Image (cartoon, helix red, strand yellow):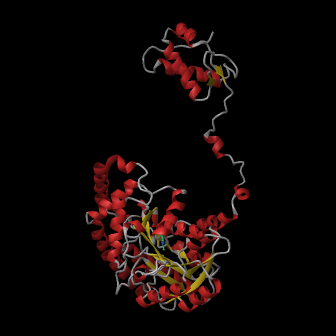
């Protein structure tokens, strides 16, 4: 007979006591695989409980894999695989990931490891991090957004908790279409696909075009996620140098004629990493060239809103009469990157094709977040926030420019003055060669870090360049960081001369 004791204090329900005691007996091998348990009637009589109490305990044992139950038969203890413990997880696994990983994913893996986070510096304080294009959370309009999310849920409720429209929340698409019209782009909501950030838009376009042997013309240097992603998609990057006014158009024409790329990827505003914004003329000429060769353009408008110095040129898409331009935008670089909402504006057929790729990958974007963002935009908070960001960063960039003049001698480095955005591209000079790791460790010791130039080129170029991003730093941090950078350069010059 199976000995079980029921505690009648009522703290633990009787069915659970039976379950736990049976489970212990099975785990301690008092009951072994193949052993039969008493029938529900018999055990209920023995314990003085209702049959349904025993049946519930057996149901739980079955659900957790301890017994097998067949209609009309007594339950039988089954051979059950042991659960993995925390200790097991510490052991080395049996899969050799290096052997099973596709060659294409290796460059992504390597690139990710290259992007090391900042660590504490010699100054005792935090490292001032110019490496990241993340946003300054201190400027996030959290309270307004919370109210908007709440309102959206209150008014639309369950409609926002389903998958929703595959192409995105229609009111938001309508808002974006209207907003793009204010930038000179004539577009309808049907020509807009909401994506999980602009990065997904780029990924979708690359995957739509990917075929062995095909190539994409890109700026050189370019946004650091482009080259690894192109390679992952099996597309060949064709680097076209960036001059003071954007991509070298003579070289682009040569590439278009000779290599027949399937796409030209460009960032006309505050190009990442150089911070260069192209002129209206350059944009017109780039479009004309692509029209001549009938090559589509992926226009990355990540910094469309952050043109805060001088005259703002119109997006290339605004002049696109032949649906050549796929325009990609985002809320990440002016509002919150964490909501992961971006969009693609393109010809309807192109949108449908991108939508189908997206549908088989991550289905759609979060409806609730889109609705919250829509409420935020519709109630005027977005327009006000853009104005605030322009005001704040105009002043922060002026602080950076002033600090360069004050702390960095022109012999030590050259840099490009940006016309907006968050980025400053700098060429470090030194009287004798300095290796990248030497620069980096010196910078970290002084409590400052930046994104290394090599991340933005296909080859080994870029060793003496750094990209400084002020996107998450306030004026005091910017000034202190540039002063520390000046100390690094002074030290290099003192040691190497
Ligand atoms: C040039 C460029 N495009 C796209 C993105 C991706 O933006 P999102 O956060 O919307 O995916 C970034 C992010 O830094 C970027 O620098």
Looking at this view, is 145 or 492 the one in front?
145
Looking at this view, is 106 or 391 the one in front?
106
Q: Position of residue 196 (x, y in %)?
A: 46, 61
Q: Position of residue 435 (x, y in %)?
A: 63, 80
Q: Look at the image and tell me whether residue 490 can be seen.
A: no
Which residue lies at the image location 68% right of the left edge and 22% below the top edge? Answer: 29
Q: Quadrant of residue 220?
A: bottom right
Q: Position of residue 133 (x, y in %)?
A: 46, 70
Looking at this view, is 227 or 489 the one in front?
227
Location of the C terminus (image quadrant):
bottom right
Question: Which residue is the extreme one toward the left?
Answer: 379
Label total for image: 0
Which residue lies at the image location 41% right of the left edge and 86% below the top edge? Answer: 406
* Residue 16 against residue 134 in the figure, above or below: above
Left or right: where does residue 249 sit relative to residue 110? left
Which residue lies at the image location 66% right of the left edge and 16% below the top edge? Answer: 36
Q: Position of residue 478 (x, y in %)?
A: 40, 76
* Residue 31 against residue 471 in the figure, above or below: above
Location of the N terminus (image quadrant):
top right
Looking at this view, is 118 or 165 the one in front?
165
Q: Quadrant of residue 235?
A: bottom right
Q: Look at the image and tell me whether residue 445 can be seen.
A: yes
């Amino acid at each position: 007979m199976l000995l079980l004791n029921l505690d009648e204090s009522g703290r633990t329900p009787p069915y659970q006591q039976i379950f736990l005691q049976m489970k212990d007996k099975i785990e301690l091998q008092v009951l072994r695989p193949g052993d039969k348990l008493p029938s529900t009637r018999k055990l209920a009589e023995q314990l003085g409980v209702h049959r349904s109490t025993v049946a519930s305990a057996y149901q739980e044992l079955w659900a957790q894999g301890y017994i097998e139950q067949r209609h009309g038969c007594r339950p039988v203890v089954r051979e059950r695989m042991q659960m993995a413990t925390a200790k097991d997880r510490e052991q080395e696994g049996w899969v050799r990931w290096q052997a099973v990983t596709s060659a294409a994913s290796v460059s992504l893996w390597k690139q990710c490891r290259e992007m090391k986070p900042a660590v504490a510096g010699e100054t005792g304080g935090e490292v001032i991090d110019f490496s990241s294009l993340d946003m300054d959370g201190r400027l996030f309009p959290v309270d307004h957004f919370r109210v908007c999310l709440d309102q959206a849920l209150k008014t639309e409720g369950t409609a926002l908790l389903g998958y929703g429209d595959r192409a995105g929340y229609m009111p938001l698409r309508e808002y974006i279409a209207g907003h793009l019209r204010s930038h000179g782009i004539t577009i309808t909501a049907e020509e807009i696909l909401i994506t999980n950030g602009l990065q997904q838009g780029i990924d979708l376009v690359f995957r739509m075009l990917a075929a062995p042997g095909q190539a994409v013309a890109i700026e050189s240097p370019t946004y650091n996620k482009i080259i690894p992603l192109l390679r992952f998609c099996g597309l060949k990057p064709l680097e076209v140098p960036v001059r003071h006014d954007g991509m070298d158009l003579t070289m682009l024409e040569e590439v278009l004629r000779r290599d027949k790329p399937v796409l030209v990827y460009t960032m006309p505003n505050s190009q990442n990493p150089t911070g260069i914004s192209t002129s209206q003329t350059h944009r017109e000429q780039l479009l004309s060239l692509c029209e001549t060769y009938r090559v589509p353009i992926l226009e990355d408008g990540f910094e469309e809103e952050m043109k805060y110095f001088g005259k703002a040129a119109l997006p290339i898409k605004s002049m696109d009469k032949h649906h050549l331009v796929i325009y990609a935008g985002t809320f990440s670089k002016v509002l919150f990157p964490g909501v992961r909402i971006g969009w693609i504006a393109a010809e309807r057929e192109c949108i449908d094709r991108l939508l189908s790729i997206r549908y088989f990958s991550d289905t759609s974007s979060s409806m609730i977040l889109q609705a919250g963002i829509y409420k935020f935009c519709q109630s005027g908070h977005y327009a006000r926030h853009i104005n605030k960001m322009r005001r704040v960063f105009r002043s922060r960039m002026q602080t950076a420019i002033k600090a360069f003049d004050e702390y960095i001698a022109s012999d030590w480095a050259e840099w490009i003055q940006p016309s907006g955005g968050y980025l400053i591209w700098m060429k470090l000079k030194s009287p004798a060669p300095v290796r990248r790791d030497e620069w980096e460790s010196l910078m970290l010791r002084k409590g400052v870090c930046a994104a290394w130039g090599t991340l933005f080129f296909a080859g080994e170029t870029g060793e003496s360049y750094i990209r400084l991003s002020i996107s998450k730093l306030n004026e005091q941090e910017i000034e202190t960081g540039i002063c520390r950078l000046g100390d690094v350069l002074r030290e290099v010059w003192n040691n190497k001369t």
